Image (spheres, rainbow, N blue to C red):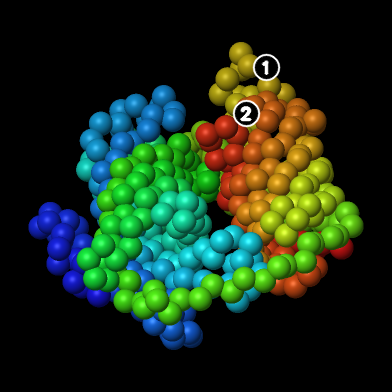
Amino acid sequence: MLTFLICLLPNNILLYLWRMSRQILLFLLLSVPIFAQEKNPNRDFYEVFYGYGTLLRHNTNISHLVGAHPEIITLSFNRKTFGEKLWQRQFNYPDWGVSFQYLDFRTEDLGRNYSALAFYNFYFLKRKLRLQFAQGISYNSNPFDLESNPKNIAYGNHLLSATTFALLYTQPKIFKDFGLNIGMSLVHQSNGSLKAPNTGTNVFVLTVGMSYDPSDTGKVEYIEIEDEKVKEPVRWNFAVRGGINSSDYFNLGQHPFLVLSGYADKRLSYLSTVQLGAEVFFAEYLREEIKYVSVAFPNRNIDPDTDYKRIGLFAGHEFRIGDLGIVTQLGYYVYYPYQNESRLYSRVGGKYYFNKKWFGALSIKSHGANAEAIELGFGVRI
């Protein structure tokens, strides 16, 4: 089916697909075991998208990179849900799936990005309006190099975090099994300060796509059950996060960091949980940055023995989708001896609950539009 869709694309887009054929093959091979677990002809459909975008100037330092209009091609596999699980009914029977995204910035300074993403589709207005949230990893073909590519201050290394938000008008089965999608999306990619430099990129995209859905819609029956309300007392959470990141100053190396968090949460409904807590940050890159700045910029009067640790208070919200949680938090440093960013910080990420107590977490911590770290962690909820 995807082959037929690809044949309808213009020659220049086919050339893009040919250049990324190895990545597509790897993506499909990895996908087969996942999709083969459940066979239902009424569940699966396929899509191909073409997008024409604009690189947003979210940071004045990347002005020299803004100019050419990026182009994006996306291939996706989608699986429908019909309400077998509670979260499916609560979210109006969303889809889930995986996609491969090819982004050509049309400038050699930025190169090309190849992304593998997992996503959810949420439907509104009698399933004509679709909101998609996708998260995954991306590979950049031409990252920063002091000698060969000094202009690419967006990406300090090949491996990136990739996030896409899309709003689409969906019209399935316009002609037999083929449908049409039109809309817009925002594509964010960065390495989370894993290696400097890292301004990241944000691309606004206008997109058009075609779908192939071989399912028999006349046989689709959504399960409708009156679900009981969720009632829980206040729960206490303890989490440990860590990883590797680097300073915005060049050649200071990559260093480990550790975050210890404690917070209370209250589940308001099946979908929504609020949080309030505190955390301590141990970032070794700050220790090295303090030493460097105290020598390189004596006019700033930085003591080389300044404490590099920080303490923050935060409030947050968790959006539950079955065993998954989408977390957003806003924090404020109450202990902040070395000032290199705003006192305000944010965290966006996901959690997976292995059972009622233990969870794993992956998140991005930022100051404004600047990502400080990609955090990997685990925790307990009691």
**Image mark for residue 301:** 1
Helix, strand or loop for disc 1: loop
**Image mark for residue 343:** none
Q: Say which residue appears at 53% left-offset and 44% top-offset.
A: 193
Query: Hey, which residue is sitting farthest right in the picture?
Result: 233
In the image shown, does 72 or 366 lie closer to the viewer? Answer: 72
Residue 257 percent across, percent down from the top left: 67, 49
Q: Say which residue appears at 27% left-offset and 51% top-offset.
A: 208
Among numbered discs 2 and 1, the one appearing first in the sequence: 1
Q: Is residue 55 left or right of residue 351?
A: left
Residue 356 percent across, percent down from the top left: 78, 70
Residue 163 percent across, percent down from the top left: 47, 51
User: In the figure, residue 177 lies in which quadrant?
Assistant: bottom left
Quadrant (top left/top right/bottom left/bottom right) for the C terminus: bottom right
Q: Which residue type carries mark 1?
A: Asn
**Image mark for residue 341:** 2
Q: Say which residue appears at 48% left-offset and 66% top-offset.
A: 96
Helix, strand or loop for disc 2: loop
Rendered position, 236 above or below 300: below
For residue 102, say whether it is visible: no
Rendered position, 231 above or below 85: above
